[in-house]
C-alpha cells in the first residue's frame, strides 16, 4: 500500500461530496484506494482543519521484527486538500 493514497480521500471529501459524504464514507474510499493490502477503515481518519479536509493514515506494517526482538514498524502519513 502506498499511504500516499490517502491523498485521494482528502480530494474526494472536497470535490466528490456525493461519494465522500461522511467521515465513514471517506475512510471507506481511502481503504478502496489502498491497493495490495487489506487495511481496516480505522487505518484512516478524517477531520476538517485550517488547511481544509485532512485525511491521515496510521498503519502497523506487518513484518518479522517481533521474531528478532525488534520494534514493529508503524507507517503514518497525512494530507490536506483546501476547501
Image (cartoon, rainbow, N blue to C red):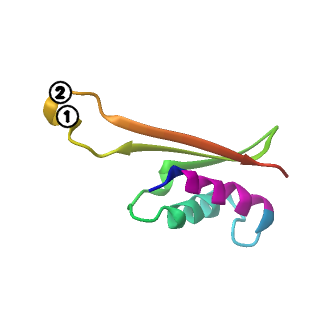
Give the quarter of the image for residue 65. top left
Assess whether mark 1 and mark 2 are in contact (beta carbons under 8 angstroms): yes
What segment is highlighted magenta in the picture? 4-14
Give the residue at the far right of this rendering. Answer: 83
Furthest residue to the bottom? 18
Residue 23 x/y as whole percent: 65, 56
Number of the label disc, if any, that sits on residue 83: none
Residue 43 located left or right of residue 62: right
Position above or below: 70 against 61: above
Read off the residue under disc 2: 69
SS class of the residue under badge 2?
Answer: loop
Queried whether the magenta region covers residue 13, the answer comes back as yes
Looking at the image, is 14 positioned above or below residue 70? Answer: below
Residue placed furthest toward the left: 67
Compared to residue 65, the image places residue 59 above or below, namely below
Q: Which x, y percent locates residue 8?
A: 65, 60
Residue labelled with disc 1: 66
Residue 21 spot, x, y in % from top left: 72, 65
Left or right of 14 in this view: 22: left
Classify residue 73 by image quadrant.
Answer: top left
Q: Main secondary structure of the magenta part?
A: helix
Q: Please give left or right for residue 72 compared with residue 54 in the image.
A: left
Amino acid at each position: 500500500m502506498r499511504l500516499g493514497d490517502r491523498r485521494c480521500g482528502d480530494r474526494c471529501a472536497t470535490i466528490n461530496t456525493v461519494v465522500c459524504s461522511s467521515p465513514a464514507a471517506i475512510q471507506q474510499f481511502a481503504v478502496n484506494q489502498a491497493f495490495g493490502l487489506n487495511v481496516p477503515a480505522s487505518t484512516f481518519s478524517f477531520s476538517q482543519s485550517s488547511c481544509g479536509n485532512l485525511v491521515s493514515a496510521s498503519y502497523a506494517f506487518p513484518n518479522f521484527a517481533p521474531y528478532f526482538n525488534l520494534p514493529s514498524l508503524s507507517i503514518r502519513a497525512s494530507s490536506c486538500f483546501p476547501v
